[in-house]
Amino acid sequence: MQSEARMNVVILAAGQGKRMQSDLPKVLHPIAGKALLAHVLDTARALGGSRMVVVYGHGGEVVRERLASDDIVWAKQDPQLGTGHAVMQAVPHLDDAMPTLILYGDVPLTRVLTLKKLIAAAGRGMAVLTVDLADPTGYGRIVRDNGALRRIVEHKDASAEERAIREVNTGILIAPTAKLKAWLGGLSNNNAQKEYYLTDVIAMAVAEGVTVASAQPADEWETLGVNSRAQLAELERIHQRNIANVLLEAGVSLADPARIDVRGSLVCGRDTAIDVNCVFEGEVVLGSRVTVAANCVLRNVRVGDDTRIEPFCHIDGAEVGRDNRIGPWARLRPGTKLADHVHIGNFVEVKASDIGEGSKANHLAYIGDTSIGKNVNVGAGTITCNYDGVNKHRTVIEDDAFIGSDTQLVAPVRVGRGATLGAGTTLTKDAPEGKLTISRAKQITIENWSRPVKKPKSK
Ligand code: UD1
Ligand code: CA
């Protein structure tokens, strides 16, 4: 259910992003695994029921395809003649009954709270998000008169005196829509860059007696844009550090808050500890007192309380119960469901399988398309042969079974409750419960056999 739209949001994303040196449009480059523009769209959505117009440019069709959504209207700007010209392309889609908020598609980290402050500051008038910078070079300067915002002058058009102003335009602003449309119609490109400057509407508003308020973000990084890969990497670290801080405040231990990457959402219980160089993708939920050792990658995973994940595990699309011990070097693939007190050891791969309480596969195994009951021991080197080259088949191992080392279970096959399979068995028929089943060539010793000896070399 979409609540009623309260404002138009225009997102400027037509800039070419030449400094990225990339075939990918700039706004599709990711922060925390999500496209820059997708961050901005989500922020706009979080403001509540907004009509969004994205202004895209040359080569931007791929942006439309990748981020297609019913709540977005796309407006093409080609050629790109400045920020004012960009907003003009959105004009036919703007509803006069509500104000228009302008955001940049390459400024991904603005807080929703900051935008709410800006909207509140505007009231029924206009407001600009500004920030004081130690080095304002390149930015539009905020020119005030007795504290009142009068106009914005672009760096290239500014006098030496104006260039000394440290309060700059972040580019984010909100304006009454009908008036904005009229002001846009009056823009000229008579300036140093021969561009239609959106910023010129401020002086027009002031001339009409519309008050122009301002608001400031709590943090400077909220207004940082991406023009190069270096800036992209910088924003990634800022964003990750923010996520790390939230985890620390929620009672999670991080061995090094600078060495964790969350590309999605990570929710943890109390006293969970995460060692260095772990990556979390998609939706990950860790219980309380979970430990994730160094160098693990977890993606779309749920992990129960008190489970230990040892170093170098790759866990994808799995549900892991309480008090498990996983790894080191374990791989859990989609469809894996581990009950409580399960051990999965080194070089064990599990896929689309359920493993019951107290069962163990501690070394070198492949368990695919399998249902394993409780307290089963899977010996080293056990392989489920689940694929006949055409179809996948299931293996069932009932409670208390013992699978000897180096066993192949040729699916479909069932191992009965309490059955034992001798080491080296190739199981092609069901193993009855409670019995020892073994398929192994009888061991023989050849008497009177001697090793061949090397023939003397003939001259
Ligand atoms: C603009 C502001 C400047 C402000 C700065 C903050 C104007 C005239 N200047 O500078 O006051 O300090 O942002 O970063 O508004 N874009 C288009 N179409 C265009 C031009 C730009 O879609 O024709 C988009 C870009 O993709 C980008 C944003 O608008 O997302 C800003 O463009 P950019 O060239 O970085 O800003 P400036 O004009 O230098
Ligand atoms: Ca620029």
Image (cartoon, helix red, strand yellow):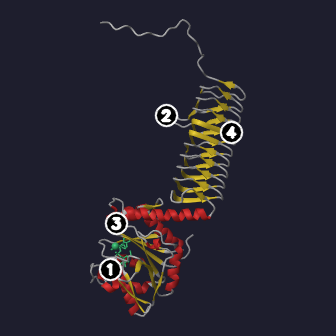
Q: Position of residue 130 (x, y in %)?
A: 44, 80
Residue highlighted by disc 2: 389
Is tag 4's residue or tag 3's residue first in the polypeptide sequence?
Answer: 3
Q: Position of residue 393 (x, y in %)?
A: 57, 36
Quadrant for residue 62, please give it. Answer: bottom left
**Residue at position x 36%, y 80% from top?**
140
Residue type, numbered disc 2: Gly
Disc 1 versus disc 2: distance between alpha carbons?
67 Å
Which is closer to the viewer, label 4 or label 1? 1
Q: Quadrant of ligand 1?
A: bottom left
Classify 10 Å Cα crowding around label 3: few (below 14), some (14-19), many (20 and above): some
Q: Position of residue 272 (x, y in %)?
A: 63, 56
Quadrant for residue 338, please give it. Answer: top right
Is tag 2's residue or tag 3's residue first in the polypeptide sequence?
Answer: 3
Q: Is residue 70 visible?
A: no
Disc 4 versus disc 3: distance between alpha carbons?
56 Å
Disc 2 versus disc 3: distance between alpha carbons?
48 Å
Residue type, numbered disc 1: His
Q: Which is nearer the eye, 297 or 356?
A: 297
